[in-house]
Amino acid sequence: MKPISKILIIAGSDSSGGAGIQADIKTVTALGSYAMTAITAITSQNTTGVNSVFPVTPSEIKNQIIFTCKDLKPDAVKIGMLYSTEVILQIIEALKKIKAKNIILDPVMVAKGGARLINNSAIKTLKNKLIKKTELITPNIPEAEVLTKLKIKNIDDMINSGKILIKLGAKNVLIKGGHKSSMQIEDVFINKREIKIFKNKKIKTKNTHGTGCTLSSAITTFLSCGKPLKKSCELGIKYVNQAIKSNLNYGKGHGPINHLTSFNIKGEFKI
């Protein structure tokens, strides 16, 4: 099997492999595409939380993007952890230089264990400058609340929050409903023309580390291969749900999901 498309991932590293750039690479690979990376930060973490964050300099992040894409032109770009205004501005400049298209932004703000991964100045820059450069932004409910300053309690609040993000310049928004305490997960896709609610049964498990990173990377992969954006969201959600169902149960905290759920390994390569 040859990769169908090339994807540039701009995100932080998760030493435990469940989230961040490791989850992104696994997702892109498992869905049949080729992953390239620009690492924004190195974290020391495991399933119980984040121990430390070591930032990569903004200029070096920019260098990673430009030098990689000078040789390998991406069909789509997934953006994850961005910790400072300087990083965001350098990334915007780099993406303009490489003439990037199909940009998906996952506005990572807090790790599963509660550690803050972005400062207030960067949130403001993300809202004012980066959102409008993207094809899709994929906040979860807490992230959407920070970006819109609207308390989200129900599906109507999710829709209103999406409309605010559209007014801020987002072309399309997918608000993830996994943080709601209900038997059913409702993810809201919204743009100026339509609203689509994806409904799925909530899977009872604590092992959901990296679901946001995985979903945005899955959507980016499907989009890069020519699927329409709304269909890419539907397929991405389906992939993540299957990955959660495996319930790997690794570690003592919030364990990772199974990125290999899409694999059919040939007999000659089975262990």
Image: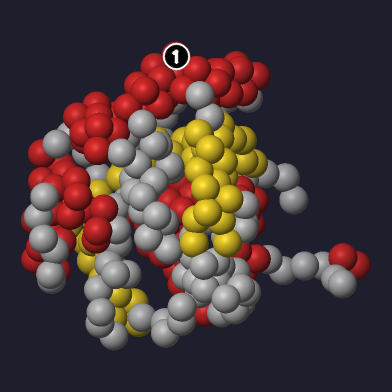
Is 227 above or below relative to 153?
A: above
Task: Note whether 216 is above or below 245 in the view shown.
Answer: above
Q: Position of residue 23 (x, y in %)?
A: 57, 54
Report which quarter residue 192 is drawn in: top left
Residue wearing tag 1: 97
- Position of residue 210 measured from the top left corner of the image (x, y, whole percent): 49, 60
- Asked whether the viewer can see residue 165, the reply is yes
Let me know if residue 27 appears in the view.
Answer: no
The structure residue drawn at horizontal position 40% and vertical position 37%, both measured from the top left corner, is 82
Viewer-nearest residue: 200 or 213? 213
Res 115 → quadrant: bottom left
Residue appearing at x 23%, y 66% in the figure: 197
Q: Position of residue 165 (x, y in %)?
A: 16, 44
Q: Closer to the camera, 2 or 124? A: 124
- Residue 190 at what x, y percent from top left? 20, 53
Task: Choose between 203 and 123: the one closer to the eye.
Answer: 123
Q: Is 38 situated left or right of 182 in this image?
A: right
Q: How many marks?
A: 1
Type of amino acid at the residue the image marks with label 1: Lys
Q: Is 149 located above or below residue 100 in the figure?
A: below
Query: Residue sitting at 12 percent across and 70 percent down?
Result: 153
**Residue 212 image-quadrant placement:** bottom left
Q: Image quadrant for the C terminus?
A: bottom right
- 46 on left or right of 91: right
